[in-house]
């Protein structure tokens, strides 16, 4: 049963990825590479650098928010998930 569920999840993921590529191909058909490069070169380098730095800072803020949430909830962030561990959920339930 578990193996069948894993296979089904993989198939659904592959289907969604293929659908996203198909949609992306249709959307990008409207644009030509040389036009995109020309338009990017028209943007001032300082603006491009600033937008890149602000984007990185935004993602760092999201990571910081997740780490802060893990630290305040007692969850283990190193486990790769944001769910509290069973022991911290038990502690929360017994603390009430």
Image (tube, rainbow, N blue to C red):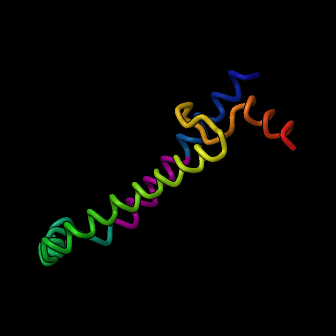
Q: Relative to 66, does residue 5 appear above or below in the rendering?
A: above
Query: Residues in magenta?
Result: 16-28
Residue drawn where x is 41% and y is 57% of the image: 59
The vertical placement of 5 against 13, above or below, is above
Count the labels in the image.
0
Where does the image place residue 95, in percent across and percent down from the top left?
84, 40
Question: Is residue 1 within the magenta segment?
Answer: no
Quarter residue 54 falls in: bottom left
Position of residue 70 in the picture relative to residue 86 (left or right): left
Q: Where is residue 60 in the image (x, y as percent from the top left)?
A: 40, 54
Name the residue: 49% across, 47% down.
17
Q: In which quadrant will I find the N terminus?
A: top right
- Say which quarter of the image contains residue 90: top right
**If the image is split into quadrants, where does the C terminus sit?**
top right
Q: Magenta-highlighted stretch: main secondary structure?
A: helix
Of residue 38 and residue 24, the one placed in the foreground of this image is 38
Quarter-wise, where is residue 92 in the image?
top right
- Left or right for 57, reference 76: left
Q: Which residue sits at x=61%, y=42%?
A: 82
Give the x, y percent position of residue 47.
20, 74
Task: Check residue 18 for magenta coloring.
Answer: yes
- The percent position of residue 2, horizontal first and vertical second, equals 72, 23
Q: Nearer the viewer, residue 91 or 86?
A: 91
Using the image as rendered, state which of residue 48 and residue 25 is in the foreground: 48
| Left or right relative to 65: residue 59 | left
Identify the residue at image location x=26%, y=63%.
Answer: 52
Q: Which of 80 and 25 is in front in this view?
A: 80
Compared with residue 24, is residue 69 higher up or lower down, i.e. above or below? above
């Amino acid at each position: 049963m578990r193996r069948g569920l894993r296979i089904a999840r993989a198939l659904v993921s592959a289907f969604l990825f293929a659908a996203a590529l198909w949609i992306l191909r249709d959307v990008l058909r409207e644009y030509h590479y040389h036009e995109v490069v020309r338009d990017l070169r028209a943007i001032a380098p300082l603006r491009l650098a600033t937008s890149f730095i602000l984007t990185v800072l935004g993602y760092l803020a999201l990571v910081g928010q997740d780490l802060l949430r893990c630290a305040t909830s007692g969850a283990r962030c190193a486990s790769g998930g944001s769910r509290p561990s069973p022991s911290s959920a038990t502690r929360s339930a017994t603390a009430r």
